[in-house]
Image: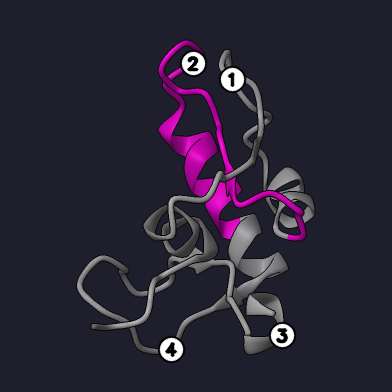
Amino acid sequence: MASPINRAVELLAQDQAIYYVGGHTGHMLTRAQGREDAGTWADYINIGMEHGAFDMAGLAEYLAGLVEGGIVVARAGALLREGDPVRPVTSADAK
């Protein structure tokens, strides 16, 4: 089996809890906020577009900030597109 894309997928596969940051009513969708959020401790970030504003331009800026602030995978499986930000899981994280 291929390795998981991120820590949240790996934890769920092990019936473990996952933790997130971000509210359910919207998130600051700016490039600067994306850069800041790239270093989060959480397993995933909830940006709250279901109950917040549907801001695709803001989302594009936010994702660009995540890429600038984090690590981008050079090659990956079908669930990951070129340029998508990810949180890498190292062998040290698994211990």
Measuring 45% from the left and 23% from the top, which residue is drawn there? 49
Name the image quarter holding the C terminus: bottom right
Asked whether the beta carbons under mark 3 and mark 4 sit within 8 Å of each other, the answer is no
Q: Is residue 60 above or below residue 86?
A: above
Instruction: Report whether 1 appears left or right of 31.
Output: left
Mark 1 element type: loop
The amino acid beneath tag 4 is: Ala
In whole angstroms, how far apart are the C-alphas of marks 3 and 2?
Answer: 38 Å
Residue 61: x %, y % from top left: 57, 47
Is 1 on the left-hand or right-hand side of 44? left
Mark with earlier residue (3, 2): 2
Q: Amino acid at mark 3?
A: Ala
How far separated are the C-alphas under marks 4 and 2? Answer: 32 Å
Q: CA distance from mark 1 to mark 4?
A: 30 Å
The residue under label 1 is which amino acid type?
Gly
Query: Residue 81 location, x and y as percent?
Result: 31, 69
Question: Mark 3 against mark 4, which lies toward the viewer?
Answer: 3
The answer to whether mark 2 and mark 1 are in CB contact below 8 A is: yes
Query: Dot 2 corresponds to which residue?
Result: 53
Which residue is the site of mark 4? Answer: 74
Q: Residue 26 — which label? A: 1
N-terminal-most mark, 2 or 1: 1
Q: Is residue 57 found inside the magenta-colored segment of the image?
A: yes
Seen from the viewer's position, the closer of residues 38 and 44 is: 44
| Residue corresponding to mark 3 | 92
Query: Is residue 64 placed above or below 21 in the rendered structure?
Result: below
Q: Earlier in the sequence, mark 3 or mark 1?
A: 1
Q: CA distance from mark 2 to mark 1?
A: 6 Å
Question: What stretch of residues is rendered in magenta?
Answer: 39-64
